[in-house]
Amino acid sequence: MIKLESDGTFIVHSGGADIGTGLDTVVTKLAAEVLHCPPQDVHVISGDTDHALFDKGAYASSGTCFSGNAARLAAENLREKILFHGAQMLGEPVADVQLATPGVVRGKKGEVSFGRDSP
């Protein structure tokens, strides 16, 4: 699960635990790439099965495969929601908008901000 905070940062709840495998870094980088933001704007809460689904554990590269892909898919889902709402605010089709600089949805008619610089 990924949550957009009011300051434009993101919180990723991951069921996987980083036990020296670098899983938190992988999850952070994958989410940041999809959400078009710097990695420092993505905060990972790992091993939290109260807010994330069960994770099978960190065996070899399985953490990257399972938790990494779960984070990527959650980020893609959130990105689509951000673009949808940004397009509605701009009065444009979703196909005409994109994530621009961090915290900005840009379309042909202008841009809207959802980050820390929002009014």
Image (cartoon, helix red, strand yellow):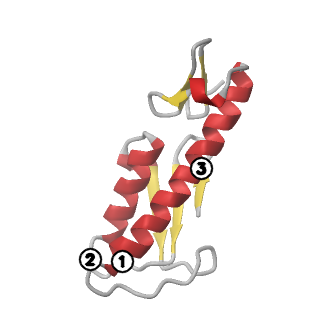
Report if residue 6 is visible in the image. Answer: no
Report if residue 92 is visible in the image. Answer: yes
Across and down, in percent, residue 43 comes to 46, 57
Q: Residue furthest top?
A: 109
Horizontally, residue 44 falls left or right of residue 89, namely: left
> How far is the residue under mark 3 from the one under mark 1?
21 Å
Tell me, yes or no, whether the two marked residues, 1 and 2, touch with CB atoms within 8 Å.
Answer: yes
For disc 1, the neighbor class at 10 Å (few under 14, some 14 to 19, many from 20) is many
Q: Amino acid at mark 3?
A: Leu
Instruction: Judge depth for marks 3 and 2 and give the one in front.
Output: 3
Q: Which residue is mark 2?
A: 21
Q: Which residue is mark 1?
A: 63
Q: Quadrant for residue 36, please give it.
A: top left
Q: Quadrant for residue 109, please give it.
A: top right
Q: Quadrant of the N terminus?
A: bottom right
The tag earlier along the polypeptide, 3 or 1, is 1
SS for callout 2: loop
Work out whether 14 lies above or below 85. Answer: below
Q: Amino acid at mark 1?
A: Gly
Across and down, in percent, residue 41 comes to 44, 47
Across and down, in percent, residue 21 comes to 26, 77
The tag earlier along the polypeptide, 1 or 2, is 2
For disc 3, the neighbor class at 10 Å (few under 14, some 14 to 19, many from 20) is some
Q: Quadrant of the C terminus?
A: top right
